[in-house]
Every structure is written in structure tokens, then in C-alpha cells.
């Protein structure tokens, strides 16, 4: 049995695959919106601090995590030109 070539598959049967990271990111965004909404509507979650403090705290935590992401991305981009063979060569032993 041979598998059909991609060009032989009818368009109605072709499937678009969504990467798992996209699904995980979408779930995270939905969860984040839900958490901020819960802070906005439930006074027990704000611990009597008012509405602004928990929301700004949440936004500050997300801003810190986004900043860490950007710093790591810039660092990785700067390291792309390095030769991996130099970093992963075997270290000779004394004997």
C-alpha cells in the first residue's frame, strides 16, 4: 500500500495542524483574562485593598515576565553567531 502524494489529496480532506504552543498560549491568555476579571468583580479576592491594587499587581507581574522574555530573546539572538563546535568540544584530561 502506498500513501497518496500531498498533491493527490482532495482539498476537502486536508487538515490544518495548529501547533501545541499556540494552543497553550491561547489557553494562557484566556486564563489571564479570567483572573483579571475575577479580581475586578470579586471583592474578596482584593483582600480589602480596593480594585486598583490587585489589578496593578497582576499587570506588574505580567510586565516583569514579558520583560524577562524580551531580555532572554535578545540574549539568544546575540548568541546565534557563535560557533557551537567551540562551546561543545571535549575538554582534554590530564592523564
Image (tube, rainbow, N blue to C red):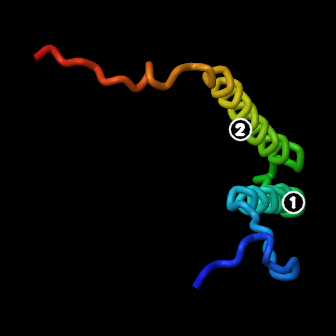
Mark seen at residue 37? 1
Pointer 2: residues within 10 angstroms few (<14), some, or many (20+)? few
SS class, disc 2: helix
Instruction: Locate the C terminus and report the quarter of the image it occupies.
Output: top left
Q: Is residue 38 above or below residue 59?
A: below
Nearer the observer, 79 or 13: 13
Disc 2 from disc 1: Cα separation:
20 Å
Q: Nearer the viewer, mark 2 or mark 1?
A: 2
Rendered residue at 45%/24% (across/down): 85
- Indicate the position of residue 33 as horizontal and vertical percent values: 84, 58
Quadrant position of residue 63: top right
Instruction: Locate the N terminus and report the quarter of the image it occupies.
Output: bottom right
Rendered residue at 81%/62% (across/down): 30
Mark seen at residue 46? none
Quadrant position of residue 94: top left
Q: Is residue 94 above or below residue 26?
A: above
Q: Which residue is mark 2?
A: 65
- Indicate the position of residue 32 as horizontal and vertical percent values: 79, 56
Residue 77 appears anywhere in the view: yes
SS class, disc 1: helix
Rendered residue at 84%/41% (across/down): 56
The answer to whether 37 appears left or right of 91 in the picture is: right
Pointer 1: residues within 10 angstroms few (<14), some, or many (20+)? few
- Indicate the position of residue 55 as horizontal and vertical percent values: 84, 47
Amino acid at each position: 500500500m502506498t500513501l497518496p502524494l500531498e498533491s493527490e489529496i482532495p482539498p476537502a480532506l486536508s487538515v490544518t495542524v495548529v501547533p501545541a504552543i499556540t494552543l497553550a498560549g491561547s489557553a494562557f491568555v484566556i486564563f489571564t483574562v479570567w483572573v483579571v476579571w475575577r479580581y475586578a468583580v470579586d471583592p474578596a479576592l482584593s483582600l480589602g485593598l480596593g480594585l486598583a491594587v490587585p489589578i496593578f499587581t497582576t499587570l506588574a507581574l505580567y510586565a516583569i515576565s514579558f520583560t524577562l522574555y524580551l531580555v532572554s530573546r535578545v540574549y539568544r539572538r546575540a548568541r546565534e553567531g557563535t560557533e557551537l563546535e567551540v562551546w561543545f568540544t571535549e575538554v582534554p584530561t590530564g592523564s
